[in-house]
Amino acid sequence: MPVQVYLAPGATDMRKSINGLSMLVAEQFELDPFSGHLFCFCNRRRDIVKILLWDRNGFCLRHKRLEKDRFLWPQSEQEVMSISGQSFSWLLDGLSIEQVEAHERLVFDTV
């Protein structure tokens, strides 16, 4: 089963750690925090993202804080959003997850 990336709607209190975030996933989003999928949360200022992941025998929590600029977090505050891995990469790189297309990758022949 491929890994899914889920974005939490709106702003999340970044004081929450593994226990609080896994409870949000289970109770509010009605998803399984032990599934191995990525669950992503953003603060109100949109300069911090936390990513929760179950990895075989324990939780991993990744935290990214921007020193300048803001994440282009989706405006929907209604429900959890599932996005592709590519869209997730765009989000962390400061791009919109709604990119229509990107430039093609160039491959050079080495002779």
Image: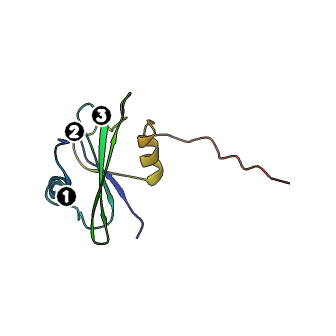
Please report whichever mark, 3 or 2, sits nearer to the chain's N-terminal start. Answer: 2
Percent coordinates x, y for residue 85 in the rendering: 44, 53
The spot of residue 11 in percent (x, y) is 22, 38
Image position, residue 105 (x, y; %): 65, 47
As rendered, which of 53 and 77 lies closer to the eye? 53
Instruction: Give the vertical position of 8 relative to 65 (above or below).
Output: below
Q: Residue furthest top?
A: 68
Mark 1 — residue? 22
Do tag 3 and tag 2 residues touch (Cβ < 8 Å)?
yes
Real-space Cα separation, disc 1 to disc 3, in angstroms: 20 Å
Q: Which quadrant of the rendered structure holds the C terminus? A: bottom right
Q: Nearer the viewer, residue 46 or 86?
A: 46
Q: Is residue 36 above or below residue 18?
A: below
Side of 13 where 2 appears, left or right: right
Q: Which residue is mark 2?
A: 11
Quadrant of the frame with the N terminus: bottom left
Q: Secondary structure at mark 3?
A: loop
Residue in the image at 55% along x and 42% along y: 101
Number of other residues with Cα within 10 Å of mark 2, as a class: few under 14, some 14 to 19, many 20 or more: some
How many tags in the picture?
3
Name the colour scheme: rainbow
Q: Would residue 12 appear left or right of 3 to someone viewing this image?
A: left
Instruction: Mark 2 and mark 1 in contact? Answer it, CB < 8 Å.
Output: no
Amino acid at the residue labelled 2: Ala
Label 1 sits on what residue type?
A: Ser
- Give SS at disc 1: helix
Between residues 3 and 99, which one lies in front from this camera angle? Answer: 3
Separation (CA) of disc 2 from disc 1: 16 Å
Q: Which mark is residue 46?
A: 3
Mark pair 3, 2: CA separation: 8 Å
